[in-house]
Amino acid sequence: MEIFLGAFTEEWERRRAAFLHERLMGRANDDEEDRGRRGSTVPVAGSSQKPSRNFKKAARRPQTPNSSSPRRPMGTRFAGLASGSQPAVVKMASFGGGGRLGAMAGYISRNGEVSMETQSGQELQGRDAIAALCDDWAHLMGNRTESRDIGLFCIDIAHGPEKGQALHEWARYIVRSAVGDRSFAFGVAEHDGTFRIEGVVVLRSKAGERLTADAKATEIVQARMRAKGGDVGKAEFRFTGYGNGVEYGAARLRRLVARFDGAVETDRGEKIADAKQAGDLVQQEWRGELHSRKSRDVMHLVVSARAGTDVEAFRAAARAFLAEEFGEHRYVFSLHDPTRDPKAEQVGGRRPHVHVHAIVAMRSEDGDRIETSIGSLRRWREGLAKEARARGILMEMTDRRDQASAPAYTRNQVRPISRKGRTEHAGTSNFARRRYDQKRREEPTAPRTARSLEYMKKVRSQWLEVARHAENSDAQNFAKAQLSRMATAELSLKEMPDARDLQNENGSRARAALVELSKLAEVDSMSTMTRSEFEAYEKRVEAALVQAERVTPEAWRSRFEEIASAARDHVEARREMMEQAEQARDRTSDNRRVRQLDDANREWDEAVARHGLSSVETGTGVMMAVEYYRQLIGSAGDDQTRFDRASLQASLNFELARAGELGAAGNAYIREIAEVDNDVRVAIEAAQRSGERVRKMFGNADERQGPSRPEHGSHDRKSKSDKLLRADRMKDSGDERTDPAEERVRRLEELRQEADRDRDRDESEQ
């Protein structure tokens, strides 16, 4: 059966048809290079086929915009928006490790009730399909262990504080004795004369020591407490749980506050009365102490359209967009239609707009990782808008500066309080609440960097052009509204202190601190750091944050919080870049080791085929010892005063003599090595000369002895001859050694003297 790829209008359809045709014809296991030329780079999810890691480099899609597809002009985009086009929305909802893949797939498929579609066009439905998907992606999951950032603990004490001592002061002393200088919060309660302290602690200390919050860590803390004695030594401490990140810490601290009805205090004696204060503490103060690390094996992407958008057209646009951007990665996606969503509105389902959830493996089959920079997000929005327009959906890529939009808030800055319809959130800090409110109300906001301000000038001129040449009043009014928003944003910008203004005024510690923070949060340079460089940079940012917060007046608090948030986000971005660079180096090193192992195995097989297994095994053992001592001597360099240099040289000479014996005895593998190794060649020649001398010497003895010599005597003489032969060869090899190899030389000399005595005895008997 023959297929005609030209009959398909979509690229993803052609790719799927080509791959399914190959499976049907029994050629599904063809070389990956052939499949790369056809454009199919990933097998169907759930198939038993093992993916090859040898993809042809030319088949890879570049991570930069295609030069043959220039960006859509700003004026064209603005005219489209003024005419009613909707903005392209592509959001990174979250990242997760390989262990989260099943939960993510369950979420987007509504626990298997909504079908998912793979990168090859295969539909998956049901919980069994989710399990098969996890197995199919297992080889792409790094499964890096998440850092343990927050620990939960419990301390039981048989008696309470002394008379007149405050309960929380007493409990705080005990907790500090247990966990040291770490930040913590706790509550204490009494039951039948026994006191129990429950709390939440940052597992990383100020000095960088991280507790693991497991049984071993419990033993360490308990031993520390017993060493202190007194009330502390009598207390029973144990960790009851641990978790990763700000989200976990905030949730657990809020739960602790609710459990103790607001009677919770920090390590500094500050009271935490409600959930808001708990969130503020973790978000604003503990966050910088966590040094959190989370695996990023998969990415959860959300692609949205306005309510009323044609569902099937948007599905096709999202499918084509994912195939274009992530064609070399594995992914699944699921469309959520409010009219068919099995999840109830009260629990977060049936959102009023159509949207697609996609889960994408961060690493491709050939090891390339997805870049998640600001530029990548912009390219993704451009790609979605292009595919949507090709299917009759009016859509344009937008930049938040195009309409003076407020910056987006992050997941760590808010917590959901209502999921009915559009999810409602509450800010986890004062700054986060203001940022959330600004975005929710779409307050006009102007950027502050020089580059963005220059960009805004171009935006203003383009909106003026659209307003002048608009074909109808609606488009003209839309353009005028954008110009009004920009004017409002510029007014609010003038009311706030600017980093450049601060820098020009002297004598203010607050201004200097904010300027320093602004420099640290600058995103123009994003060169990859080493781990040591990143750790130094992170400490510098933390120190600048502490200094700026201490000296910043209340009037500039909002400015400080904005810069501080940008600095923390910048630190996290640099952390991700540093970790990705480390993983890339590890993969390169692993690939090099694999190639070296493959080369060694191939050379071994070829040598066995030429010389036989026994010769190769024996010769390899000797040559490994030779190379070992050569490396030790080489590492010593030109240092002739090293006390062990003579010993190392003697050991090398001994191993070369062994190699010479094998070569002289006819080991073809050693003789082949001697063709390129001069030391081995010299050792073989020395062993051959020594063998000739010994054979002549014992040949004369046999002639004098005559045929009447008993058989056992001949055997003894042969054994002694072998000993003498080895000793003589060692002499010819120039082996002069000191301890420890000196012992072997002395033993060889003893064997030689014994052979001489036996020969003299035989001659006297004759």
Image: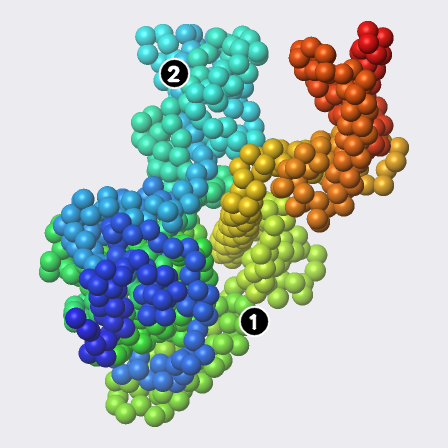
What amino acid type is highlighted by mark number 2? Arg
Image position, residue 607 (x, y; %): 56, 45
Residue appearing at x 20%, y 56% in the figure: 116
Q: Quadrant of residue 436?
A: bottom left
Residue 158 appears left or right of 352 = right
Q: Which disc is residue 203 wearing?
A: none
Count of numbered circles on the image: 2
Callouts 1 and 2 close, C-beta under 8 Å: no
Image position, residue 71 (x, y; %): 41, 79
78 over 681 or under it: above or below = below
Q: Which colour scheme is used?
A: rainbow
239 over 95 or under it: above or below = above
Judge by depth and name the residue closer to the eye, 607 or 175.
607
Judge by depth and name the residue closer to the eye, 480 or 418.
418
The 10 Å Cα crowd at callout 1, few under 14, some 14 to 19, many 20 or more, is few
79 over 747 or under it: above or below = below
Residue appearing at x 31%, y 27% in the figure: 259
- Tag 1 secondary structure: helix
Q: In which quarter of the image is residue 320?
A: bottom left
Confirm whether residue 158 shows in the render.
yes
Q: Which disc is residue 450 wearing?
A: 1
What amino acid type is highlighted by mark number 1? Ala
Judge by depth and name the residue closer to the eye, 384 or 412.
384
Residue 361 appears left or right of 702 = left
Residue 762 appears left or right of 236 = right
Residue appearing at x 44%, y 41% in the figure: 144
The 10 Å Cα crowd at callout 2, few under 14, some 14 to 19, many 20 or more, is many
Query: Image quadrant for the C terminus?
Result: top right
Give the residue furthest to the front. Answer: 707
560 over 685 or under it: above or below = below
Q: Which disc is residue 196 wearing?
A: 2
